[in-house]
Image (cartoon, rainbow, N blue to C red):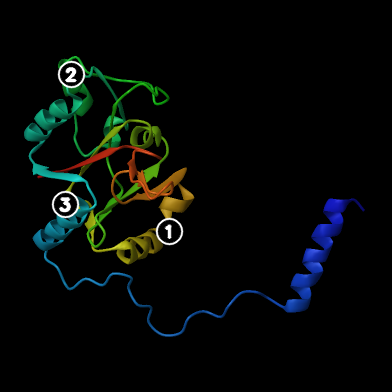
Amino acid sequence: MNARDRILSRLRQARASQGSPLQPPTEGERRRMLPLPELSDEERLECFASEAAALGCVVYRMSRGEALEQIMDLLDGDKSVLSWAEEELPYPGLHELLASLDVSVAPPDDGNVRVGITGVSAALAATGSLVLESGAGRPRSASLLPDRHIALLTPEQLLNDLESWQSAQQTLGYPAFKDASNTVIVTGPSKTADIGHQLVKGAHGPRELHIIVLD
């Protein structure tokens, strides 16, 4: 028996002597992390926009025509973007419209592209968060590599909170964990203050997060 096997054997013996480390299920109704009152669709959108803005996001609510103009403004002359596949975006024909304006979709591993465009799987009003599921047609690089991330969503994708999303996942059979290659919850632009308590933006992802809610 080598050193590794001896260590694993001791760990197994210790675990067996202590019994199961699992705790019994919590009894009674679980409390929601950030309880919200009953909200109308409009109130939910206002809550999401307020929370996201407080995190440093820029939130727009506009038509698709206005959104195209806003995207071009955010490109600021760039001629390529990273993007989810067009069928994964809540904006039919966006890639064709961008191509007509001389903007191409770059390969997903192009680290020189400054702007990324994605859809979302859900948006959470209580925390201003976005749920992003990556997989076929939804490269995670589009929301991680560029310095500026543009997320497109519709009001129908807005949920109250994380618990609402978890409940929906349970009903659907947890596709975010079974079907997606990766699922992340994005709450504001990337930032850290780990070193010297100095705030640094863009440490682990985009420095800017622009959220366009499409009417």
Question: Distance of mark 2 from mark 3, alpha carbons?
Answer: 29 Å
What residue appears at the point 37 percent right and 82 percent down from the top-left corner? Answer: 29
What's the amino acid at mark 2? Gly
**Camera-nearest label, 1 or 3:** 3
The residue sitting at the front extreme is 196
| Residue depicted at 33% across the width and 30% down the height | 146
Mark 3 Cα shell of 10 Å, populated few (<14), some (14-19), many (≥20): some
Judging by the rendered image, the residue that carries numbered circle 1 is 173
Picture quarter with the C terminus: top left
**Of callouts 2 and 3, the N-terminal one:** 2
Q: Quadrant of residue 93?
A: top left
Q: Could you say whether the residue bearing mark 1 is in a helix, strand or loop?
A: loop
Secondary structure under tag 2 reads loop
Query: Between 50 and 184, which is closer to the camera in this rendering?
Result: 50
CA distance for labels 1 and 2: 43 Å
Residue that carries the numbered disc 2 in the rendered image:
77
Which of the 4 image quadrants contains residue 44? bottom left
Q: Nearer the viewer, mark 1 or mark 2?
A: 2
Disc marking residue 155: 3
Mark 1 or mark 2: which comes first in sequence? 2
Q: Amino acid at mark 3?
A: Pro
Q: Residue at x 11, y 65 (%)?
A: 40
Q: Secondary structure at mark 3?
A: helix
Percent x, y of residue 74 = 17, 29
In this image, 15 relative to 47: left or right?
A: right
Which numbered circle lies on residue 14?
none
Circle 1/circle 2 CB separation < 8 Å: no
2 relative position to 193: left or right: right
